[in-house]
Amino acid sequence: MKYDICSFENRVAVVTGAGGNIGLAVCRQLAGYGVRIAACDVDAKIVEERIADLKAAGADIRAYSMDVLSRKAVFDAIAAILSDFGKIDIMINNAGVWNHRDVIGRQRFEEMDPVEWKRLLEIDLDGVFHCCQAILPHMIERGYGRIINTTSIAGEVGLPGYADYAAAKAGLIMFTKTLAMENAKKGITVNCVSPGMVARGEIVAEPGTWIGRKGGADEMARAMVFLAADESGFMTGVDIPVDGGRILGPHNCDM
Ligand SMILES: NC(=O)c1ccc[n+]([C@@H]2O[C@H](COP(=O)([O-])OP(=O)(O)OC[C@H]3O[C@@H](n4cnc5c(N)ncnc54)[C@H](O)[C@@H]3O)[C@@H](O)[C@H]2O)c1
């Protein structure tokens, strides 16, 4: 007998950073369950191209511009989504950056630019604050919600050369837990998924993990979709690391 651990009864999801690696994987999986999706990114055009095949396959997925740096842009986008879809059941706060070091690599804390520090926290932490403030009144009114934040194992164990990123993601984990407590009796669950190193395209070796490779965006998305499902109402304040065992500590033993 087949038993499906995830079901979605006429659900609407908002995914931020939907044009990116993990965001797009989340959209694909949710669309596979028939979830209607508002796919948000800094510029709707980024998303529009990438979801074209999902739309062509019949998914009800629409692109929205939502720069999480701007509180107004977040509130405007949520209002537009509510007007278009009539409700929001699932909010996946996934937009995030590693900042300029995506290009220049690790940076010692002493050399960190305070402007860059502030900007990263404004996207990775304040951005989720704005999104949650925009969506919570609606979820509270309806007595239902699934909020999932994309954090990082950098927020759990630290990451040399990325003090700002680690600080933002650690803040987001505790933000998640606190929001979970505040909303537990309102039908709203708040959880996070902490990816380890995620591959773009081909999965490559990653000696720093016990499993010995990077993860795929699909593997991150699976955990998010699980938390977003109707059946996951008894899980809240949880942080799921999807990291190939990286959180277990240094990979220094082959058995
Ligand atoms: N890739 C990894 O190894 C890894 C590891 C741990 C955590 N994460 C987290 O996963 C999430 C998704 O990352 P990804 O790997 O898919 O990266 P990605 O760069 O492919 O996607 C991130 C998306 O966020 C969007 N974005 C950036 N700034 C934004 C803003 N101000 N407003 C709205 N959208 C914005 C980008 O346009 C992009 O589409 C991020 O929160 C990231 O921190 C990634």
Image (cartoon, helix red, strand yellow):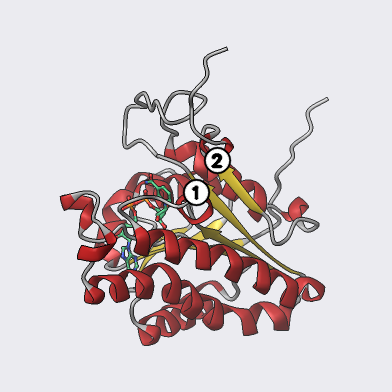
> Looking at the rendered structure, which numbered label has been put on residue 232?
none
Label 1 near ligand 1 (CB < 8 Å): yes
Identify whether 36 is placed above or below 207.
Answer: below
Q: Residue at x 25, y 62 (%)?
A: 45
Question: In this view of the protein, which residue sits in the foreground, 95 or 42?
Answer: 95
Disc 1: CA contacts within 10 A as few (<14), some (14-19) or many (>=20)? many
Quarter occupied by residue 180? bottom right
Residue at numbered disc 2: 247
Question: Which residue is at a point 35% across and 50% down the rendered structure image?
Answer: 160
Q: In this orientation, does residue 51 appear? A: no
Residue at left 50%, top 60%?
37
The residue sitting at 49% across, 48% down in the picture is 153
Tell me residue 46's x, y (percent): 26, 59
* Residue 215, x across and y down, in percent: 45, 34
Residue 153 disc label? 1
Classify mark 2: residues with Cα within 10 Å, few (<14), some (14-19) or many (20+): some
- In the rendered view, does 119 fall on the left or right side of 77? left
Q: Is residue 138 visible?
A: yes
Task: Label 2, secondary structure: give it.
Answer: helix
Q: Is mark 2 within 8 Å of ligand 1?
A: no
Question: Residue 82: where, in percent of width, then height?
Answer: 53, 78
Q: Alpha carbon of mark 2 to alpha carbon of mark 1: how far?
A: 7 Å
Question: Would you say 93 lies left or right of 183 here?
Answer: left
Marks 2,1: beta carbons within 8 A:
yes
Residue 204 locus on image (x, y percent): 34, 25
Label 2 amino acid? Answer: Ile
Q: Is residue 213 left or right of residue 230?
A: left
